[in-house]
Amino acid sequence: MNKVYDGNLAATVTLSDNRISGDTLTDNHTNAVFRRQERGNGKPVSVNGISISGVDAGNYALQNTTANAVADIMRDR
């Protein structure tokens, strides 16, 4: 998710999945960080420690425990 420049690498992300309707799962991650803290568009974000939990988690197998995304770091107004 995009953020206003604050000088640190922390990123906020929302995970999604392709669960079967009605299944109970929670998507988790241990951290999400921008690789560099400079302002700009399309900055790489690394998401680590991806896991799932919940009543129906045993019916699913994770294909990745890490992910990469991009987001913008905007100028403070």
Image (cartoon, rainbow, N blue to C red):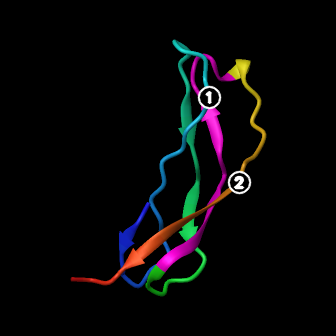
Residue 4 percent coordinates (x, y): 33, 75
Q: Please give the residue where the numbered disc 2 appears in the rendered image.
A: 66
Q: Nearer the viewer, residue 20 or 53?
A: 20
On-image quarter of the C terminus: bottom left
Q: Rate crowding at label 2 as few (under 14), some (14 to 19) or many (20 or more) other CA atoms within 10 Å.
A: some
Q: Considering only vertical position in the picture, is 48 above or below 56?
A: below
Q: Label 2 sits on what residue type?
A: Thr
Left or right of 56 in this view: 8:
left
Q: Which residue lies furthest to the left in this view?
A: 77
- Identify whether 19 is placed above or below 50: above
Q: What stretch is highlighted in magenta?
A: 41-57
Q: Which residue is drawn at the image coordinates 60% and 30% (left, top)?
A: 53
Q: Nearer the viewer, mark 1 or mark 2?
A: 1
Amino acid at dot 1: Asn
Residue at 60% over, 17% down = 20
Q: Going 48% across and 54% down the picture, which residue do you hit?
A: 13
Q: Residue furthest top?
A: 22
* Residue 31 versus residue 58 in the image, above or below: below
Let me know if residue 43 is in the magenta part: yes
Q: Where is residue 9 in the image (x, y as percent from the top left)?
A: 50, 76
Q: Does the magenta stretch include residue 62?
A: no
Main SS, magenta region, reads: strand
Marked residue nearer the N-terminal end (1 or 2)? 1
